[in-house]
Image (spheres, grey):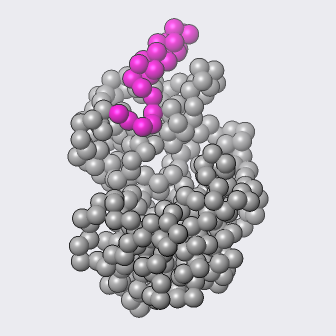
């Protein structure tokens, strides 16, 4: 096992498909810091000024000749970060499979069918149904279903012995554009009475994009194959620990009011959307934040402190334009939060 501090035993030639969006930049920086050679392949539209000294190849994966720039080139590893359409895997494989030693596919924990089960490991084969159409869109198949198809196509195209599948949970941290974690430190920072969902002991789980991408690079250094659940933190985290941890990196006077799950559901507030990160730990979502990560821990998965994730998430958010800061993409709108809290108190709580 390659430890985070140890230098890798050999230098790799790494091709990253994408590389300039959310998880790509830190992945590139970490790979370069460990002495690897990196090539980026994308359309050149997202953050084109990044990494001026890194080789860049351009192509559109939706175009008929989109992979032309990759033809005839050889790499030790190709990391496929942004797959949204399953056919991208087979089309990339048609060009790359003969010329790369390993293909890394970024999948998701949402491939598992039974999220009511606690402790799901990579050995669990009860996955969602893969769409039959290789070009299935989000209207035709869920995110998890499309990722199942991508995993199948990766192994069929590159071979199981050359395929590494990483199944992350909710990916958070600086650079996130979805606000699915960011809502909490942002709202905490604003102060005042704040709605907190469920009970203080409800579990939550996520992975900082920097921990995810560093682990992926180290797996490549180990020449790992197979599938890994990648979420955290080690030992678990409660929603109370998350919220108080966010408060600890601010000077906020926030006061948490814990609102019962049934009350929230009766008012049609959606876990994981209106109340991101959190899912009620019961019924079909009992195992949502209780995945088995034993295999990843044994392979060297590490976690930075929650304080670092919360602080850097806030730093990134405050660097965004005012119009972006004014329009969060997840979480409770202020008026909805006030309305729900008023109803909770009116009910005698």
**The magenta stretch spans residue 247:** no
Q: Is residue 200 above or below residue 144?
A: above
Quarter occupied by residue 46: bottom left
Q: Is residue 247 above or below residue 52?
A: above
Farthest residue, direction front:
64
Residue 37 in sight here? yes
Q: Is residue 204 above or below residue 265?
A: below
Is 183 positioned to the left or the right of 80 in the image? Answer: left
Give the x, y percent position of residue 69.
42, 79
Taking depth in this image into account, of 6 and 129 the one nearest to the observer is 129
Residue 81 in sight here? no
Farthest residue, direction bottom:
10
Give the x, y percent position of residue 162.
60, 83
Quarter occupied by residue 12: bottom left
**The magenta stretch spans residue 340:** yes
Name which residue lies at 58% across and 83% down: 97
Taking depth in this image into account, of 8 and 167 the one nearest to the observer is 167
Name which residue lies at 45% across and 20% down: 336
Name which residue lies at 40% across and 61% down: 23
Quarter occupied by residue 202: top right
Give the x, y percent position of residue 130.
72, 59
Q: State how many labels appear.
A: 0
Name which residue lies at 23% across and 46% down: 319
Give the x, y percent position of residue 13.
41, 86
Taking depth in this image into account, of 239 and 152 the one nearest to the observer is 152
Which residues are the magenta region?
327-349
């Amino acid at each position: 096992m390659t430890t985070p501090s140890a230098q890798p035993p050999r230098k790799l030639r790494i091709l990253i498909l994408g590389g300039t969006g959310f998880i790509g930049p830190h992945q590139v920086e970490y790979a370069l810091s460990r002495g690897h050679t990196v090539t980026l392949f994308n359309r050149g539209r997202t953050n084109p000024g990044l990494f001026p000294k890194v080789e860049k190849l351009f192509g559109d994966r939706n175009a008929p000749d989109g992979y032309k720039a990759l033809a005839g080139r050889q790499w030790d590893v190709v990391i496929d970060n942004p797959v949204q359409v399953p056919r991208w895997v087979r089309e990339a494989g048609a060009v790359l499979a003969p010329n790369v030693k390993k293909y890394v596919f970024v999948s998701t924990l949402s491939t598992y069918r039974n999220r009511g089960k606690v402790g799901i490991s990579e050995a669990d084969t009860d996955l969602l149904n893969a769409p039959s159409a290789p070009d299935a869109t989000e209207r035709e198949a869920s995110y998890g279903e499309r990722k199942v198809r991508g995993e199948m196509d990766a192994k069929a195209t590159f071979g199981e012995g050359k395929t590494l599948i990483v199944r992350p949970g909710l990916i958070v941290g600086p650079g996130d554009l979805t606000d699915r974690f960011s809502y909490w430190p942002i709202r905490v920072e604003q102060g005042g009475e704040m709605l907190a969902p469920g009970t203080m002991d409800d579990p939550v789980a996520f992975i900082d994009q920097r921990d995810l991408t560093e682990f992926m690079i180290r797996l490549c250094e180990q020449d790992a194959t197979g599938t890994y659940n990648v979420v955290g933190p080690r030992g678990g985290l409660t929603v109370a620990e998350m919220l108080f941890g966010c408060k600890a990196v601010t000077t906020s006077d926030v006061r948490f009011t814990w609102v019962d799950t049934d009350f929230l559901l009766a008012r049609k507030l959606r876990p994981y959307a209106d109340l991101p990160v959190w899912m009620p730990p019961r019924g079909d979502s009992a195992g949502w934040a209780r995945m088995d990560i034993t295999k990843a821990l044994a392979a060297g998965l590490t976690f930075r402190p929650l304080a670092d994730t919360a602080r850097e998430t806030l730093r990134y958010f405050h660097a965004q334009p005012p119009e972006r800061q004014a329009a969060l993409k997840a979480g409770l709108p202020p008026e909805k939060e006030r309305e729900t809290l008023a109803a909770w108190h009116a009910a005698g709580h």
